[in-house]
């Protein structure tokens, strides 16, 4: 499959193992033909964004144990759908992104300048 790249053109880094994220629950924002939502943007969740996402019909903060989903808390990293991040950007509530863990494929839908403006600073 080769080396997967991030939006900076370097090797895609781990987004989160606690909670374990990614469409394939491998900790990385990898994608494939089954990932219709394109979970390729590594975010750092904020209260504001989690409220927005819940109101937009995607409750990321409530645990769903039967699916092994622990719920995302503010400050935790999560692989988010590219279009949900764009919606949050347009609504003024975009969460910070971890650039080296954002899959380069998100650049087909998102602008690198927008992502850089929201780059997470540890």
Image: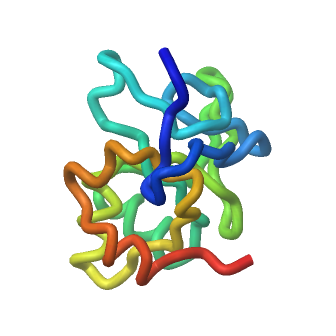
Q: Quadrant of the C terminus?
A: bottom right
* Residue at x 58%, y 43% (from the top left corner): 11
Q: Tally the numbered discs.
A: 0
In front here: 79 or 115? 115
Q: Is residue 76 left or right of residue 116?
A: right
Which of 25/54 is in front? 25
Name which residue lies at 46% across and 79% down.
Answer: 118
Figure quadrant of residue 56: bottom left
Where residue 75 appears, x then y in whole percent?
70, 68
Look at the picture and state if 34 lies above or below 29.
above
Above or below, 120 relative to 77: below
Instruction: Tell me: residue 92, above or below residue 106.
Output: below
Q: In percent of the image, x 49 and y 32: which residue is there?
A: 30
Here the colouring is rainbow
| Left or right of 83 on screen, residue 26 | right
Report which quarter residue 7 is drawn in: bottom left
Residue at coordinates 32% horizontally, 76% vertically from top-left? 114
Residue 20: image x %, image y %? Answer: 70, 36
Quarter of the image holding residue 66? Answer: top right
Q: Position of residue 87 (x, y in %)?
A: 24, 66
Q: Position of residue 45 (x, y in %)?
A: 58, 66
Question: As drawn, which residue projects farthest toward the right?
Answer: 18
Q: Is 82 situated left or right of 90 in this image?
A: right
């Amino acid at each position: 499959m080769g080396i997967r790249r991030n939006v900076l053109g370097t090797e895609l880094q781990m987004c989160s193992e606690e909670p374990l994220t990614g469409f394939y629950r491998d900790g990385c924002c990898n994608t494939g033909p089954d990932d219709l939502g394109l979970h390729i943007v590594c975010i750092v969740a904020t209260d504001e964004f989690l409220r927005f996402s819940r109101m937009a019909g995607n409750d990321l903060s409530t645990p769903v144990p039967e699916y092994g989903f622990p719920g995302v808390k503010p400050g935790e990293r999560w692989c988010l759908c590219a279009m949900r991040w764009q919606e949050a950007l347009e609504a003024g509530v975009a969460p910070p992104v971890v650039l080296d863990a954002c899959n380069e494929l998100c650049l087909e839908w998102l602008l690198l300048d927008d992502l850089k403006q929201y780059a997470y600073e540890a």
